[in-house]
Image: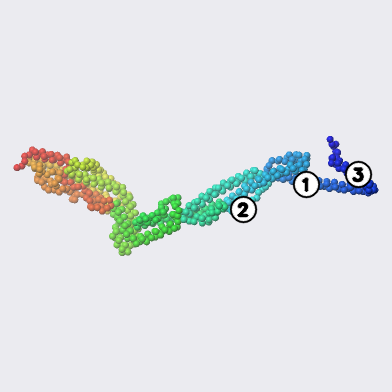
Amino acid sequence: MKEIGSPPSCCIRSNCAFDDSLKDLQQLWNDIGENEGDKDRMISELEMQCLQLYRRKIDEAANVKARLHQSVAAKEAELATLMASLAEPDNHLRVNSEKRSISLKEKLASVTPLVEDLRKKKEERLRKFTDTKAQIEKITREISGYGYNNGEEENTISLDEADLSLRKLAEYETHLRTLQREKSERLQKVLGYVNEVHSLCCVLGIDFCKTVSEVHPSLQGRSVEQTTNISNCTLEGLERAISQLKAERNSRILKVNDIVSSLFELWNLMDSSNEERNKFSRIASVLGSSECDISEPGILSNEMIDQASAEVERLNKLKASRMKELVLKKRLELEYICRMAHIVPDTSTAAEKSSVLIDSGMVDPSELLVNIEEQIVKAKDEAMSRREIMERIDRWLAACEEESWLEEYNQDDNRYHSGRGAHINLKRAERARVTVTKIPAMIDNLINRTLTWEDEKGKPFLYDGERLVSILDDYKLSRKQKQEEKRRQRDQKKLQDMRLTEKEAKYGSKPSPRKSPSFRKSNGYSVNGNGSIISSPRRSSIGCSPSELLTPRSYSGRENGFLEEMRRLSTAPSNFVAISKEDTVSTYTSICGSEVSSPPHI
């Protein structure tokens, strides 16, 4: 083993080599014959040169040591900075603990890989930070409306390299995701607004590209590279555009409704053909439609509205030339409504009078037409208020007709004979008898309804110019007189039968069966009180002369609004000898019985 404190082997070898060289030099000096003073001087010079060389080497080694120490310190400082920036655990503690036991080169060799590894990690972390922050700033600019200069936003990114920790990166990424969600929501909102603008522009016939370009050029979507602006300014601009378009749509809908209403009115007045109407069927569909249902492209365009307006103007000009015909047509419509409701129309606009006024120029046809249209509206309203009473009148008149038919049926001598339709007439007669029994109640109910109507309206209920209550009262009186006349005739007939029976019993005479007239009066003759045959009318009047049941139809002479022959609503007048089937059979039996018992006259 080496002795502690002994010079290193390299120094021993150097000293040995130096001694050998010095011996060789002294031998050379001896051979040369140098004196001792020169020898000492030269040896001193050699020693001085060796000392200088040592000192120079020492300085060089000190400089190398200083540089190594500086490099190690710099690496350690960079390592500490990188670890602090990246928030990495302190892995170089081991190096510090062994700082005094290893050389500087070893320290540098051990620190350098750590620094290189952290440098790469920092570069990767810095790239992530840069990308994340670049996206954050880009979306922020898009939201604010200032992110549309390509490439400029990358040059303005500033990062705090002192904090590149994963925690900070997570904060940036969380912020980025929040901005991305906001961007997606804004983009969806912008696209929804743009679609609504497109729909409105399509319906109104407005240039869509021009409309959205006024809000922001990026909304046209012509360039793939151009980003859609999603700023608050763009959203507000789209909202304003939608509001303006909706206001314009509402304005045009009102305008179109007025035009279409005029078109329908003129078409009805002019009796326009379906071909003419079909030309404007698209715009006519707007009338009565809700805003959400109006989606056909160009249906509210100015071109479509102008065409409809031109058609209205054309029809108005044509209407002016045919005004007289229109006035007369409207008057006929008014008269028809009044006939159906049994109302007396206003005579101030009668067809003859209106024609004379128009021809003489004393009245404006348009004013006259408006007047007639107002009368039509009033007539329709009054007809609607009279509908319930009119229905009851129709039922009453139908019952009167059944009563008339029943009396004619009762006077038919062959009504009980078997034949086609006999059973049908029999059933009808049964129903008619039930209906006839309801007529008095119908009249009373109708009078009460009419009086209630008059109290509500404050005016009399007129039926073809006559007060309905008066007509009903007259009908009740006529019906009462008719019933009294029937009772009088039945009593008279019974008296005649009794006299005839007494006469036959007294004189025992009777007419020949061949020549005896039928009490059914099929030939229109009857027997007087003296037993002689006299001619009598087929049907005699009952009650007042002439005896009629005064129904509204007998007052108006019109039925269901059309001119008809004057109709007598009284039932067929009964022959004063007409009797029921049972009375006829009993009377005929009594006559036949007396005929068999009485001898013939010679």
The amino acid type found where label 2 is placed reads Gly
Give SS at disc 1. helix
> How far apart are labels 1 and 2 at the CA level?
44 Å
> Hey, what amino acid is under mark 1?
Arg
The three-letter code of the residue at mark 3 reads Lys
Quickly name the residue at label 1: 67
Distance between the Cα atoms at labels 1 and 3?
41 Å
How many numbered callouts? 3
| Residue assigned mark 3 | 23
- Say which residue appears at 51% left-offset and 52% top-offset: 194
Q: Nearer the viewer, residue 82 or 49?
A: 49
Farthest bottom residue in view: 360
SS at mark 3 in the image: helix
Residue at the spot 60% in from the left edge and 50% down from the top edge: 138
Quarter holding residue 366: bottom left
Point out the tag, 1 or 3, that comes first from the N-terminus. 3
Is label 2 in contact with label 3 (beta carbons under 8 Å)? Answer: no
